[in-house]
């Protein structure tokens, strides 16, 4: 815990790491100094601009609202950067956070390593961290993280992180190390014209009275299943049987599981309930899409989404997808490998 807390202290200290000192001094009964730790100079661990950006991220309540909700115990009423963590099966949980002048780490767990019951970093360590920070800092001046030179604030299109075009509806301002800010414009949001009677892209034969302008997303195949689950309009879906602009060279790929994943069967759960999701995505117009594990067909589809569940089996495995394109060509995705222990 002391090592982890000291590591986070480098962010609060502008990128300089200080070695923790457990003993400040030893004196005898007469007050004579018997021992003092050797003086150590701070060591530059990372760029001050990187340290500030991390502090800016970890102190942003709106950024963590999706996972934790707003105004949680991670808020202490003043600028403070904080990170929680929970180990597998709830054996441990952590909260480490800091202001510009104080860093505090909290560990919660059983000394026997016995798992707790659904206790996470947010519900276990974080309330202790919150109460300690509020108590210690009461009456102390509220400090902001001092921003170093060499940072620039740029407006971006929220979804792509690139410069916004007129078509981009969601924008925000972000800090960048000068020279790393985006210089190209967003390509995700596209204003296109569709045929109102078919819902597909219009062409030169579409009557003028049926032309409708809509905003569509031109996303890579990896992001398309998410977009469909959110009810977003995809350019790939508006293209019908035509070939939509492709943002990736791969016509078909496996989204899940991730390559080189390692899964572990639990003896405490029914074997048939321990499953992973197989998911593929590809370009527009694919037909006869099949998902394979160890050269065995797991599922077949005529339209997206291409996803199915596979019951875990111990051993090393490989998964891939196959499909037939609109032109009749059979394509196979790159195989991904994963292990089950």
Image: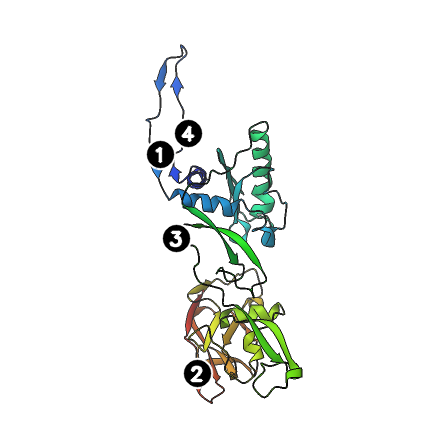
Of labels 2 and 4, earlier in sequence is: 4
Q: Residue furthest front?
A: 208
Q: CA separation, marks 1 and 4?
A: 16 Å
Dot in front, 3 or 1: 3
Dot in front, 3 or 4: 3
Q: Residues within 10 Å of mark 3 (few under 14, many from 20)?
A: few
Q: Secondary structure at mark 4?
A: loop
Of labels 2 and 3, earlier in sequence is: 3
Q: What is the x, y in percent for residue 138?
A: 59, 29
Q: What is the x, y in percent for residue 250?
A: 43, 76
Whether residue 94 is visible: no
Question: Label 1, on which residue?
Answer: 42
Q: CA separation, marks 3 and 4?
A: 41 Å
Residues 159 and 312: in front is 159
Whether residue 110 is situated above or below residue 201 in the rendered picture: above
Of labels 1 and 4, earlier in sequence is: 4
- The image quadrant that residue 80 belongs to is top right
- Do the residues under discs 2 and 3 have CB atoms within 8 angstroms? no
Find residue 179 and name its label: 3
Q: Residues within 10 Å of mark 1 (few under 14, many from 20)?
A: few
Of labels 2 and 1, earlier in sequence is: 1
Q: Residue at x 41, y 29 (%)?
A: 22
Q: Residue at x 57, y 62 (%)?
A: 269
Question: Label 4, on which residue?
Answer: 22
């Amino acid at each position: 815990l002391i090592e982890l807390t000291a590591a986070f202290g480098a962010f609060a200290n502008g990128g300089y790491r200080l070695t923790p000192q457990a003993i400040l001094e030893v004196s005898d009964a007469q007050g004579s100094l018997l021992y003092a730790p050797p003086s150590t100079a701070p060591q530059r661990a990372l760029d001050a601009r990187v340290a500030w950006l991390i502090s800016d991220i970890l102190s942003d309540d709106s950024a963590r609202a999706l996972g934790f909700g707003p105004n949680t115990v991670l808020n202490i009423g003043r600028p403070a950067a904080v990170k929680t963590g929970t180990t597998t099966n709830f054996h441990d949980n952590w909260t480490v956070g800091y202001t510009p002048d104080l860093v505090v780490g909290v560990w919660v767990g059983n000394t026997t390593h016995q798992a707790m019951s659904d206790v996470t970093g947010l519900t276990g360590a974080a309330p202790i961290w919150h109460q300690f920070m509020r108590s210690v800092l009461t009456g102390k001046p509220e400090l902001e993280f001092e921003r170093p030179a060499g940072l620039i604030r740029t407006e971006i299109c929220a979804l792509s992180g690139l410069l916004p075009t007129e078509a981009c509806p969601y924008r925000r301002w972000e800090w960048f190390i000068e020279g790393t800010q985006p210089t190209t414009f967003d390509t995700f949001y596209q204003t296109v014209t569709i045929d109102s009677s078919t819902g597909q892209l219009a062409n030169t034969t579409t009557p003028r009275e049926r032309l409708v302008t809509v905003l569509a997303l031109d996303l890579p195949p990896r992001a398309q299943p998410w977009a469909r689950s959110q009810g977003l309009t995809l350019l790939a879906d508006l293209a019908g049987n035509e070939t939509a602009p492709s943002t990736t060279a791969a016509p078909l790929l496996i989204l899940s599981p991730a390559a080189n994943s390692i899964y572990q069967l639990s003896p405490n759960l029914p074997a048939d309930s321990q499953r992973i999701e197989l998911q593929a995505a590809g370009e527009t117009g694919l037909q006869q899409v099949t998902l394979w594990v160890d050269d065995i067909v797991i599922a077949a589809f005529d339209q997206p989404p291409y996803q199915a569940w596979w019951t875990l089996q111990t051993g090393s495995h490989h998964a891939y997808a196959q499909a037939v394109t609109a032109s009749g060509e059979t394509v196979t995705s790159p195989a991904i490998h994963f292990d089950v222990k």
